[in-house]
Amino acid sequence: MRAPEGRSRPVPPVVLALRRLPNPRLTGIGAGLFAAASMLVLGCLDLLLLDGSPVVFGALFLPVSALTALWVRPADLVTAPIIVPIAFTVGVVPIAGGTGGFGGRTMAVVTALAVHAGWLYGGTLVAGVIATVRKVRLMRQRRRRLLLAAQTARPGQAAARSAQAPARPSRSAQAPRRPRR
């Protein structure tokens, strides 16, 4: 184990292994397409291989939710907990069953969503927690950068900047405004 520069404690091998994994940054739409396509493929494979096992489908939904929240770009973090329930719905269509045309299929999907709400809530919670932790870390990094920039700035530069900026006259020194009609 080696310690990165600027840290005093060693980095665990699990973290080093995770850093070697791909780290794509998907837009909100890209993350939605990834999650929906993944869940649709997993739902079809579940139907073909395991005759539509809802437990397997739900268990596979959790890592897809985590990857969606990890791979969405920082500007679109808020979309991760919104995307994954939609992806679950898309993926549950093949395993829901139902007969009798569109109405029967729709009722089967609604029933499957109600019966498997635990998996749905669990995946949404996973995506929400990961997105929240990522956002908090980004806010802390931004604050540290601003504090570091303020500490490294020379005091003379701040005085020079304030001298260069034109002073705005106070409200009382400005000409009175005419009332609007």
Image (spheres, rainbow, N blue to C red):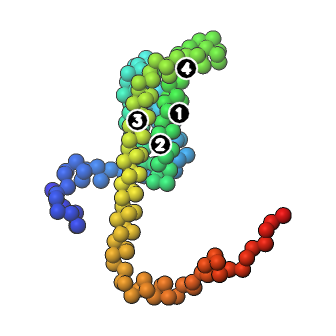
Image coordinates for residue 52, horizontal then vertical, percent:
44, 19
Image coordinates for residue 54, horizontal then vertical, percent:
42, 20
CA gap between label 2 and label 4 equals 22 Å
Sequence order check, earlier mark of 4 and 1:
1
CA gap between label 3 and label 1 equals 14 Å
Residue 86: which numbered mark, if any?
1
Quarter occupied by the C terminus? bottom right
Q: Are marks 3 and 1 in contact (CB under 8 Å)?
A: no
Residue at image location 33% in from the left, 75% down from the top: 151
Residue at image location 38% in from the left, 21% down from the top: 55
Sequence order check, earlier mark of 2 and 4:
2
Quick check: 153 above or below 131? below
CA gap between label 3 and label 2 equals 10 Å
The amino acid pointed to by label 2 is Ala
Residue at image location 40% in from the left, 46% down from the top: 132
The amino acid pointed to by label 1 is Ile
Residue pointed to by mark 4: 110
Quarter occupied by the N terminus? bottom left
Residue pointed to by mark 2: 80
Residue 125: which numbered mark, if any?
3
Residue at image location 49% in from the left, 33% down from the top: 85
Q: Is residue 31 visible?
A: no
Question: 109 or 120: nearer the eye?
Answer: 120
Q: Is residue 166 visible?
A: yes
Sequence order check, earlier mark of 3 and 2:
2
